[in-house]
Image: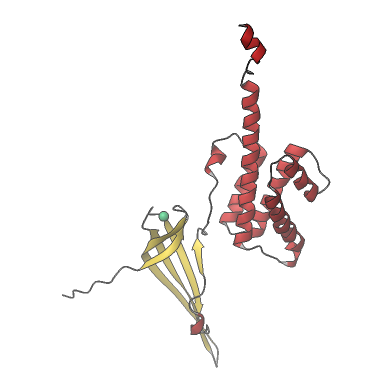
Amino acid sequence: MSEKTEKPEVLWSHCNECGHETKHDVVHRADRRRTFDDDQYSVEVGSVWKVLQCRGCEEVTLRRVDWCSEDDPMDGPGPATYFPPRVSRRKPSWASHYELPSEYIALLEETYTALHADSRRLAMMGARALIDAVIRRNAGDQQNFGQGLNALAEKYLISEQDRGIVETAIEAGHASAHRGHKPTAEDVNVVIDIVERLIHTEILAEQARELKKSTPPRPSRAAQNKS
Ligand SMILES: [Zn+2]
């Protein structure tokens, strides 16, 4: 009897549930290959499918790497595609604690769905629509996006730094969308960070106003001295 048992393959990969890179067991592997022949050449293409399971939370994911016999071995294995796609972020926890305006909830849901599908341009459009909604709600109709951002900055809802980043990322993406520009994952993440911050700031400011309204004013010193 052979003592040798095959060691299970382990891969490091981002886990959507854990929210960071974790060790995954390869619990199943399947190979698919096809050969294309003509008189002179024969080309083989294939995919390696792996079912991965996170060692932390046990979440299961499917990973596919395509290859072709014409690939340069020096290039190493091609990029992996994951099902469902890897997402580096989830809806912030505060989003479910507060009563957000229904318009925000709908747009947030769609923006995160676009992020999950790695549809970065759609996620950017969602981010832009969310900022427009915040502008309308807090400053009414504005002539253009830049003026809207000014209005938010005047109300201290957005910092000057965030404002600059949003303007660059969204305006640049908007202008070049028709030329096939695809924002990087980092660009999208920074903009979504700012949008989340913006909405959170707005909601907190609203709560503070409500609290102020419902708190009875402190009696004046003159009134206190009389009693
Ligand atoms: Zn996990």
Where, by quadrant of the figure, is residue 119 drawn?
bottom right
Where, by quadrant of the figure, is residue 141 drawn?
top right
Colouring of the image: secondary structure
What residue sits 41% from the left and 57% below the top? 60
137 left or right, relative to 194: right
Between 83 and 148, the one lying in front of the other is 148
In the displayed image of the protein, which residue is found farthest to the bottom? 40
What residue sits 67% from the left and 55% below the top? 124
Q: Position of residue 116 (x, y in %)?
A: 56, 55
Between 83 and 121, the one lying in front of the other is 121
In the displayed image of the protein, which residue is found farthest to the top? 227
In the displayed image of the protein, which residue is found farthest to the left? 1
Q: Position of residue 78 (x, y in %)?
A: 51, 74
Q: Quadrant of the C terminus?
A: top right
Can residue 69 be seen here? The reply is: no
Q: Quadrant of the N terminus?
A: bottom left
Q: Position of residue 195 (x, y in %)?
A: 64, 48
Q: Is residue 159 above or below residue 168?
A: above
What residue sits 75% from the left and 41% below the top? 154
36 left or right, relative to 163: left
For the image, the number of numbered tags is: 0
**Ligand 1, image quadrant it occupies:** bottom left
Q: Is residue 102 above or below residue 19?
A: above
Between 104 and 170, the one lying in front of the other is 170
What residue sits 63% from the left and 57% below the top? 188
